[in-house]
Amino acid sequence: MRNKSIFIYSFWIFLSLVFCCNLSVLAQNSTTTYTDSVDPSSAKDAISYKKQRDIIDIALLLLHKDPNKRLDSTQTKSMKIRLSISPIIEYTISTGFTAGLAAGGAFVTSLKGNTNISSFLGAIKYTEKKQFLLPVQSILWTPGNKYNFGGDWRYLNYPQDTYGLGGFKTTADRNIITYKYIRFYEFALKKVWKDFYIGLGYQLDYHWTISELDVLPGRITDFQLYGFHPSSFSSGIALDILYDSRVNSINPEGGSFFANFKFLQNSRRLGSSSKWNSVLIDVRKYLALPHKNVLAFWLYSVLTLNGTPPYLDLPGTGNDSYNNAGRGYMQGRFIGKKYIDLETEFRFGITKNGLLGGVIFCSAGSVSELNTNKFETIFPSVGAGLRIKFNKFSKTNVCLDYGIGIKGSRGFTGNLGEVF
């Protein structure tokens, strides 16, 4: 089994690189996106970029083309939308192998001042576990970053493993839940001081055609004890408070800080199946170390303050916005009314040209128990990962991680951009 996993993982890396190399030819016909922390048009940064290499550079060298000509496309900032379409090859513990197509775009709303890059990304995916995903996510910054608008829309047709509530569950408690799901999140925030924002948002989560599979006759699952319903509807208003000093959210630099607090109130007046509210806490700190290494810390927590959220809206491993919390555990491996996860990651370079890097990470999580609503267990994880520079201007990495948890949990995950 171990050799099979290594083979599958190696094959996935190979396919990813092949697709990236094919896309690099198309990339030469579009303007390269970069963050405000660097200026490829300056002599100093131009020399630095000529010494760096990424996957696109490697592909160009294989095609006997000069990768340094890419610097010409970054000489002038433009307000036009930079579009890209690419095939998807992914692997996660929760989905297995995933294939699909992604389309994204990046642009700035003003050429004056330090306006952050706005972006949108949509995809259509199908997994080896017969899961269908259609996510669309967007971030819009107005001129001077005075306002920030964010959206997260999703449609899922999703069979998913579930183990029940709390931290004591083992693989023997596993069964499958199938459902269809629509998410509609929209937020609007206003700058009130420097990197500090405050605003409101609306969140809708609708699950229907919910059913349980692989349940032995006579067995009562936690889903049934918690309150099984064939559908659930959560609709609420959220107060959103944000502090974000990161210039590049794809690969934050040392010295930056991020903190986000969301207070969500779901109301029957807005159509919710039940009345409940929660608070989301997301705090990230990045310390600069010698040789451009970074030590990163992440606190992620969702706490139900009162009421009873629907089972499929409960927080837990992998249930954050980008399904990253608790590497080493599949999505929903541990869930409860309250969830907290602490992660630390050391990020370092391997090659001088910046093409390869690595990470070592560890985490500790906990969920509340069904009967006591208290944290009674801790599920740790450790792991390591490889970083392959996909785009040196935006500092985007292909991230390949392997995490090991407890009770037999382990596996690979992949991301485009850092986990946090």
Image (tube, rainbow, N blue to C red):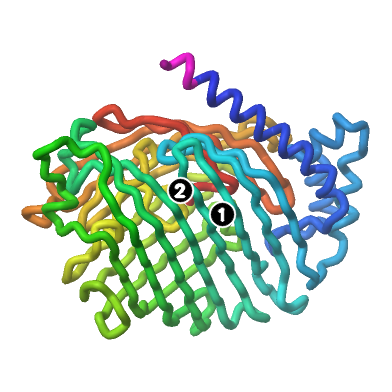
Callout 1 secondary element: loop
Q: What residue would you read off at disc 1?
A: 252
In this image, 336 relative to 88: left or right?
left
Eyeballing the image, is 360 above or below 188?
A: above
Q: What residue type is labelled 1?
A: Pro
Sequence-first tag of 2 and 1: 1
Q: Where residue 247 appears, x then y in whole percent?
A: 61, 62
Q: Quadrant of the N terminus?
A: top left
Which residue corresponds to mark 2? 296
- Mark 1 Cα shell of 10 Å, populated few (<14), some (14-19), many (≥20): many
Residue 35 % position (x, y): 69, 60
- Determine the image quadrant of residue 93: top left
Q: Which of 419 and 172 is in front in this view?
A: 172
Residue that protrudes farthest toward the left in the picture: 372
Proximity of marks 2 and 1: CB atoms separated by less than 8 Å: yes
Residue in the picture at 34% in, 75% down: 235
Instruction: Characterize the magenta stretch by its predominant secondary structure.
Output: helix
Count of marks, rendered view: 2
- Specify whether 174 is left or right of 78: left
Q: In the image, what residue type sits under mark 2?
A: Ala
181 up-or-down from 161: above or below: below
Point 47% across, 54% down: residue = 322
Q: Where is residue 276 in the image (x, y as percent from the top left)?
A: 22, 73
Q: Does 2 lie within the magenta span?
A: yes
* Callout 2: SS: strand
Horizontal and vertical percent position of residue 192: 49, 84
Q: Give the range drawn in magenta.
A: 1-5
Q: Which residue is drawn at 47% across and 21% down?
A: 5
- Horizontal side, residue 181 vs residue 168: left or right: right
Residue sitting nearer the eye, 178 or 317: 178
The circle drawn on residue 389 is: none
